[in-house]
């Protein structure tokens, strides 16, 4: 239930933000202080830092082209924000889950998803996070967000998700 | 006639866990070219058994694609000895061989099944066995008899008494199952709300390696099939742990870890100790598979820019590229005789099963599906089991290694995937 809700909200956020990658208001803090709700979306919007951040930390996903793992420019501000947040909060941990669409070998997709997650990790480390804070893992094609067999679904499944400690 | 009883191990595996809910059903799609005509006569007294043993034998033989069942009606009472057989009658019905037998309850309450395989032209006995069994071993006994007939008539070992493993997904329920090679008698090995993947039989048939996502990432387990609870992980390193493959002697496990960066191949003992890295690339190296002599490992790598199949010494070392056609060749599996390589190739956006003759490097397309994946050779090398899609539902399919004979195994309202064919077992 909670997971479905989380996915739906993440999706809603994504669609809502599609044309405006930089949201001025309502930066949300990763919900790490609520162990009772491990996958609760960051609904309680509070500024992470007083100096008004430019990017909403509730954005947690990076999307990819088929068979690719390079990070498109549009996702850099999001990764920058999370990298900065991790740099300023050394106690925070993050799990990065790389995902693939259903096409191709399941094990090869584990490796491809790992590469996607690894790419996100590298970017976060460049932005100030430490290696110890972020663990890149792969879900391959095993946990599709969307289960139809067409591109309308596949693009959503070619994705890396950033989850803070307590959310997974 | 020799007499046999079953090893305790087999019985233990059969008794394990609860029976799985829905059974696989088999649908035969194509036919083989040369089929041996055989008549399996009803065994005298087989009503003491819980199932018709002759029916199971006949189905096994027909489904192999190597036999054609001859009509056996109008023979009463069924002969139990060679002297009672009217060979001209079976010659006129165009049978090359006939099977006769009987079943009875022994004084100690156990059951006995004995059968004879007869050559119609020579009017002589090819062989026969007497089995002592419990009622629960009826199917297994039928498969053993079918194996005997198959081997005598084709010169190759039969695989009817071997077992297969596969994953069933129904909603959010993931299940690792083991069943007879005909899909019957399925048992749950593991049930999880999170995905399970890459089941791999140990060569002893008593252990299975698999990948579980129960901790929100891929972790590698080796489970003893006679134990009822899930074991401790054998590889749970930072990052992902997947793609297990057993060495033919069962003493080593190859797997893919990402603890040092990208997906790389490592070797370890089946308990996870003695870990050592085998590949050292910046690329993806995954899907290791040992050759039957244990000397080499085939694997998938994108080191050349696209995923292709490579071979390297099992101790590590310089890989040799094996596939050159197309830009997506994955999931290498070497045949049990070491002569053929089955793999999946993307051809015009479709994923199809290919077979390469390793000596001539000739490649044959075996299937024409959209999403064929996860090939697994039968231990006699005659059949390749794989996963495919029918109406957007995952089913298992089998194709003879020459591509001629095809069949499908599916479960209503569930996705079946990632088949792994188990080894020959001892007796």
Image (spheres, rainbow, N blue to C red):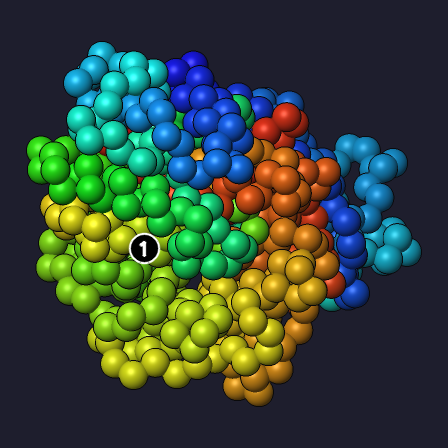
Residue at screen point 36% across, 25% down: A25
- Name of the residue lying farthest toward the right: B92
Above or below: residue B345 compared with residue B71: below
Residue at screen point 25% across, 30% down: A52
Residue at screen point 47% across, 80% down: B322
> Which residue is labeled 1 in the image?
A119
Q: Quadrant of residue B280?
A: bottom left
Q: Position of residue B28 (x, y in %)?
A: 74, 46
In this figure, what is the number of numbered marks?
A: 1
Horizontal side of B63 relative to A89 (left or right) equals right
Nearer to us in this view, B136 or A74: A74
Q: Quadrant of residue B410?
A: top right
Above or below: residue B10 compared with residue B337: above
Horizontal side of A54 relative to A61 (left or right) equals left
Kindly tell me whether residue B356 is visible in this rendering.
yes
Residue at screen point 87% across, 36% down: B74
Q: Position of residue B217 (x, y in %)?
A: 30, 39
Nearer to us in this view, A139 or B100: A139
Nearer to us in this view, B245 or B59: B245
């Amino acid at each position: 239930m909670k997971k479905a809700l989380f996915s739906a909200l993440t999706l809603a956020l994504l669609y809502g933000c599609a044309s405006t990658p930089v949201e001025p208001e309502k930066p949300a803090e990763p919900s790490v202080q609520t162990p009772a709700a491990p996958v609760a979306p960051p609904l309680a919007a509070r500024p992470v830092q007083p100096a008004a951040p430019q990017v909403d930390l509730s954005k947690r996903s990076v999307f990819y082209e088929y068979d690719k793992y390079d990070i498109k420019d549009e996702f850099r501000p999001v990764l920058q924000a999370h990298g900065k947040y991790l740099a300023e909060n050394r106690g925070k941990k993050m799990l990065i889950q790389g995902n693939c669409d259903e096409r191709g070998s399941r094990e090869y997709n584990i490796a491809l998803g790992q590469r996607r997650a690894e790419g996100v990790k590298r970017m976060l480390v460049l932005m100030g996070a430490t290696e110890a804070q972020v663990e890149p893992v792969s879900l391959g094609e095993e946990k599709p967000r969307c289960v139809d067999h067409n591109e309308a679904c596949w693009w959503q499944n070619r994705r890396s998700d950033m989850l803070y400690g307590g959310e997974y | 006639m020799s007499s046999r009883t079953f090893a305790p191990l087999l019985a233990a595996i059969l008794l394990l866990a609860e029976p799985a809910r829905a059974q696989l059903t088999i649908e035969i799609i194509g036919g083989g070219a040369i089929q041996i005509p055989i008549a399996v006569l009803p065994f005298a007294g087989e009503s003491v058994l819980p199932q018709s043993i002759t029916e199971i034998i006949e189905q096994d033989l027909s489904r192999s694609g190597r036999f054609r069942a001859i009509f056996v009606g109008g023979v009463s009472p069924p002969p139990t000895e060679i002297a009672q057989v009217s060979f001209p009658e079976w010659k006129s019905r165009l049978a090359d061989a006939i099977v006769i037998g009987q079943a009875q309850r022994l004084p100690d309450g156990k059951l006995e099944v004995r059968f004879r395989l007869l050559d119609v032209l020579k009017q002589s006995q090819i062989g026969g066995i007497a089995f002592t069994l419990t009622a629960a071993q009826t199917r297994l006994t039928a498969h053993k008899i079918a194996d005997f007939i198959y081997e005598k008539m084709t010169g190759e070992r039969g695989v009817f008494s071997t077992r297969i493993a596969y994953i069933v997904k129904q909603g959010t329920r993931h299940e690792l199952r083991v069943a007879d090679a005909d899909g019957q008698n399925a048992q749950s090995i593991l049930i999880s709300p999170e995905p399970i993947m890459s089941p791999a039989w140990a060569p002893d048939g008593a252990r299975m390696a698999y990948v579980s996502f129960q901790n929100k990432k891929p972790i590698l387990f080796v489970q003893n099939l006679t134990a009822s609870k899930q074991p401790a992980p054998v590889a749970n390193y930072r990052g992902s742990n997947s793609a297990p493959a057993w060495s033919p002697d069962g003493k080593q496990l190859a797997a893919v870890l990402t603890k040092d960066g990208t997906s790389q191949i490592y070797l370890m003992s089946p308990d996870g100790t003695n870990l050592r890295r085998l590949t050292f690339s910046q690329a993806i190296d995954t899907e290791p598979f040992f050759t039957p002599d244990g000397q080499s490992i085939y694997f998938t790598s994108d080191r050349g820019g696209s995923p292709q199949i490579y071979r390297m010494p099992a101790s590590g070392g310089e890989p040799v590229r094996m596939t050159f056609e197309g830009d997506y060749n994955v999931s290498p599996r070497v045949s049990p005789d070491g002569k053929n390589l089955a793999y999946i190739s993307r051809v015009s956006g479709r994923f199809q099963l290919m077979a390469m003759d390793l000596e001539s490097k000739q490649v044959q397309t075996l299937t024409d599906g959209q999403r064929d994946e996860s090939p697994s050779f039968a231990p006699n090398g005659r059949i390749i089991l794989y996963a495919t899609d029918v109406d957007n539902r995952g089913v298992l399919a089998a194709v003879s290694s020459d591509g001629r004979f095809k069949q499908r195994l599916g479960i209503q309202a569930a996705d079946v995937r990632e088949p792994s064919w188990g080894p020959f077992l001892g007796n």
